[in-house]
Amino acid sequence: MNATSKYPITISLTAGTALAFAAAVVFLMIGERRLINIPLHSTIEVFGGFAAITLGMIIIFQRSAKSSFQSAWVSCGLLSMGILDIFHGGVSTGNLFVWLRSVSSLMGGIFFSLVWFGQGSGFKKPLAYGTSAAAFLIGITSVAFQEALPAMIEEGTFTSTARYINIFGGIFYIAAAPAFFISYIGKRESRDDIIIFAISVLFGLAGLLFHFSDPWSASWWYWHSLRFIALIMVLTYALVFFKDSENKYKTIIRTAMDGFWLLDYRGYFLDVNDSYCKLIGYTREELLKMHVSDTEAKETCEQTARRLDKIIKDGTDRFETTHRSKDGKILDIEVSINYLNISGGQFFVSLRDITSRKRSEEEVRRLNVELAQKIVQIKEAQEELVRKEKLSILGQLAGSVGHELRNPLGVMNNAVYFLKMTHTEADETTKEYLGIIEQEIVNSQRIITDLLDFTRTKTPQAQSVVLNELVGDGVRKAVPNGFTVTVDIPEMLPSVKADPMQIGQVFYNLITNAVQAMPDGGNLNIKGEEFRDARAVRVSFRDTGAGITPENMKKLFQPLFTTKSKGIGLGLVVCKNLVEANKGRIEVESTPGEGTTFMVTLPIERG
C-alpha cells in the first residue's frame, strides 16, 4: 500500500490508541482472573480487534494516494469489526459475550459486501469515522442494556438467533471475496487485493462454521482458528505496511537527485542522502558527526542558530545560501526546510545545487549590461552622426550666408549712424527705436561671427596678454545698467600667452551669457587666480542666475544646443574651441537655483 509521509504518523497514533485500549481490556481481564478460564480466546479477540482497526486506518489513508473501488467499505468493515471485537473480548462470557461477537461478524460482512455496489466519487473519510463511532456506540449500548438483548445461549448451546447472525455475516464475507479476486486478476491493486480476498474468505468460513459449533467445545475452536489465522494476516500485513513505508521513505530519500538532510532541533545531522554526500564531498559517516553550520559558508554560527530558532517558530522556510565542500569549493544552494515537532523536534531539509544556474544568471546580467552599454554607444553615435550632418550643412552655408548678411547689416548700421547724426533733435521714441535697431544689428553680427568662427577657427596669433584689460573690455561692452559686477583680478597676476582677440571674444561671450542668465538683475563675480605648480592662470565668471540642470549640463558644449529664445547654440562651442586653440581649457559648475560658474584656464607666458 502507498502512503505519504504524514499517513504513518496518523495511523501510528490511531493504532497506539487502539493498542492501549486493547491492553487495558486485557489488564482488566487479568484483574478479574478471567484468563484462567479462557487463557487464549479473549486475548486473541482483543488484539485482533487492534490489528483490524490499524489496517482499517491504513486503507483510509492509502485511498488519498490511489483510489481502489473497494477500499472505502473494507476500511469501514475492519474498523467496526475491530471495535466490537475489543468489546467482545473484554466482557464476561455469556449472552453479551456472544452478542458482541455475532454483531461484529455481521457488521464487518455487510460493509465488505458493499464493494459490489462501488463507493462513488463522494466517499469521504468521515464515513469511516462515523462507522467507527456507530460501532463504539453499539458496544456501549450493548453493555449498558444487555438485559434487553436477544437470547444468544440457552442450555449450553447457541440459539438460532446467534447462529443466523453469524451465518449471515459469513455469507456477506464470502459474497465480497470474488470482488477482490476479480480486482487482483485485473491487476488493479495486486498484492492488496489477494490479501483482502484471503481475509474475507477466512472470516466468511468462520461465520459459516459457527452454525456447527457449541460454546467451549472442540467445534467452537475450529471456526475460531480460522478467525485467528485471518487476524494474524491482518496484523502481519499492518506491520508489513509500516516496514514498506519506512523502506520506501529511505529509498526515495537516498536515491533523490536533490540533497536531503534530517537534523535534530539543535542542527546536528541525523541522516543525509547520497546526493548531498556526493555534492559536498564528505561521507555520510563524517556528516553524521557534524553540525549544519560546519557546511555553511555564508552565515555565521550565530546567524544559523537564529535562523533555526525562527524556523521552529514558523514551521518552514525557503532561502538561498552557500555551502563549502570538503575541498573548499563554494557552492550555491537553494534550501527548503520544514520543522516537525516529533522525536524531540526534527528539521526535514531539501537542498538543490544552483551553482550552474547562478553562474548563468550572472552571465546573463553581464551580457545585459554590455548590451545596454552598446545601445547607449550606438545611440550616442547616431546623435553624433546627426550633429555632424547638421554641422556639415552649417559649414557649407556659413561662409556664403555670413558674407551676404554682413554687407546688408553694415549698410543698416551706417544708416542708423547717419540718422542719429542728422536727427539730433528727434523725439525720445525715435531715439529708442534707433537704439533697438543698432543693438539688434550688433546681436546679428555676433551670431554671424560665431558661425564663421565655429566653421573655420583661425590659428591664434599668440602674444603677451594682460587679463585685466580683456576682462574690463568685456564688462564695458556686455554688462548693462542694473547689474552688480565684482572684478577680483590681482594686479600681480602673470600675463598669459594667447590671442587677445580670441580670448577677448571668449570673455565677452561668457559675460553676455551670465547677464542673460539673470534677466531680473543679479551679481556677477569675476575672479582671477594663479596656479604656480601648473603654471596656469584661471579666470572664473560666477553669476547668481537660475543655474543649469544636470540634463542640460551634459549637452552644454554640443553645437546647436541652446535654452535661450534667441541664438543658435554656438556661443559656448566657439568659446571652447577658441580656448582649446590657445592651449587652455574651459570648465563649468552649476547648482540649479543658485547660479553657474564658468572657469577659463590659460597657460602663463614663459620667460
Image (tube, helix red, strand yellow):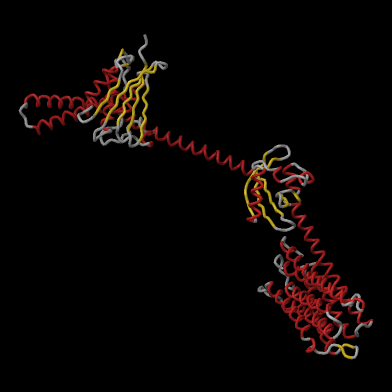
Residue 233 is left or right of residue 551, and the answer is right
Image coordinates of residue 115 in percent, x first then y, are 75, 76
User: Within the image, what quadrant is residue 25 found in?
Assistant: bottom right
Residue 185 visible? The answer is: no
| 170 left or right, relative to 494 | right
Residue 561 in view in this figure: yes
Relative to 193, residue 548 above or below: above
Residue extending farthest top: 607
Residue 300 lies, in percent from the top left, at 65, 42
Residue 541, given in percent of the width and then of the height, sits at 31, 26
When asked about the image quadrant of residue 384, the answer is top left
Q: Tell me where residue 363 sits by quadrant.
A: top right
On screen, residue 7 above or below 45: above
Name the quadrant of the N terminus.
Answer: bottom right
Q: Above or below — where is 342 with respect to 465?
A: below
**Nearer to the camera, 201 or 407:** 201
Count of picture labels: 0
Q: Residue at x 82, y 64 (%)?
A: 240
Left or right: 199 as drawn, with respect to 348? right
Q: Residue furthest right?
A: 218
Is 118 placed above or below 426 here? below
Foreground pick, 582 / 83: 83
From the viewer's perspective, tell me whether residue 149 is left or right of residue 357: right
Give whichever of 216, 77 is nearer the camera: 216
Image quadrant for the C terminus?
Answer: top left
> Which one is nearer the viewer's eye here, 392 or 480?
480
Could you tell me residue 522's position as x and y percent? 26, 32
Q: Residue furthest left?
A: 425
